[in-house]
């Protein structure tokens, strides 16, 4: 389980993150065929104790079994939340092919009950920061390797992981209707990440995009 604590403090959240990371590291150590898991996840096999994996347009090294994850280029250690997402993706990847069919968050397992939190943490900030200036979304997404697609009034697809494309869609609105947005996924996303991790991943993407908006 992966929780966001960007606006929280205290040992409760820290303990939850630490526990989640320890459990994910245990799953990593249990992988019997690292090469095959690279095939399933799209990671690059370096050796039985090391793989490279793409995450938000950066390449990370995963060291097995000691569970160290760092940026391949700089060697900087991954943030704990990113580390958990990377581990969950790599250890849970099933290798199923893309369906080419897009689904909304509510169509995921438990998505209806999770949706209010997902909307507040991901869709709300997307619309608030880009709804009236969709060209900023295109520019910001390019920094994460995003590409323009044809949905709504403006939309981009970002490959968060090799097998997890995330599509952000905006509608500008007008004098009668406020701007709106949505976030879509390939129908196989649950074969790579649990629903709660999808929320954290989308929140991470949105705030990376917001941070890249040029200052006025």
Image (cartoon, rainbow, N blue to C red):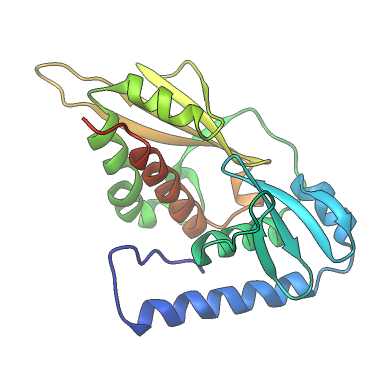
Point 38% across, 51% down: residue: 112
Point 63% across, 61% down: residue: 88
- Point out residue 173 in the picture as x, y percentages from the top left corner: 20, 20
- Point out residue 11 in the picture as x, y percentages from the top left corner: 36, 84
**Quarter of the image where the C terminus is located:** top left
Q: Is residue 87 above or below residue 181?
A: below
- Point out residue 9 in the picture as x, y percentages from the top left corner: 29, 75
Point 90% across, 64% down: residue: 48
Q: Tally the numbered discs.
A: 0
Q: Is residue 48 above or below residue 189?
A: below
- Left or right: residue 211 versus residue 35 is left
Point 47% across, 35% down: residue: 184
- Left or right: residue 30 versus residue 101 is right
Q: Is residue 129 above or below residue 195?
A: above
Q: Quadrant of residue 117?
A: bottom left
Q: Quadrant of residue 137?
A: top left
Residue reaching furthest to the front: 74
Residue reaching furthest to the left: 175
Q: Is residue 83 above or below residue 140?
A: below
- Point out residue 183 in the picture as x, y percentages from the top left corner: 42, 36
72 or 195: which is nearer to us?
Answer: 72
180 or 205: which is nearer to us?
Answer: 205
- Left or right: residue 84 versus residue 97 is left
């Amino acid at each position: 389980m992966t929780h966001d604590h960007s606006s929280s403090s205290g040992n409760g959240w820290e303990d939850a993150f630490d526990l989640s990371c320890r459990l994910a590291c245990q799953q990593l150590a249990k992988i019997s065929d690292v090469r095959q898991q690279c095939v399933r996840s799209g990671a690059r096999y370096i050796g039985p104790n090391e793989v490279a994996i793409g995450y938000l347009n950066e390449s990370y090294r995963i060291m097995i079994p000691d569970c160290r994850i760092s940026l391949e280029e700089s060697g900087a250690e991954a943030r704990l939340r990113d580390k958990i997402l990377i581990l969950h993706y790599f250890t849970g990847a099933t290798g199923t092919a893309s369906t080419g069919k897009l689904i909304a968050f509510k169509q995921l397992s438990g998505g209806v009950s999770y949706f209010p939190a997902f909307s507040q943490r991901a869709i709300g900030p997307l619309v608030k920061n880009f709804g009236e200036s969709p060209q900023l979304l295109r520019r910001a997404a390019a920094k994460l390797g995003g590409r323009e697609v044809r949905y709504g009034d403006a939309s981009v697809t970002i490959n968060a992981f090799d097998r997890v494309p995330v599509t952000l869609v905006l509608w500008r609105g007008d004098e009668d209707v406020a701007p709106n947005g949505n976030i879509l996924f390939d129908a196989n996303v649950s074969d790579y990440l649990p629903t709660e991790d999808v929320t954290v991943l989308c929140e991470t993407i949105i705030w990376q995009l917001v941070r890249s908006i040029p200052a006025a």
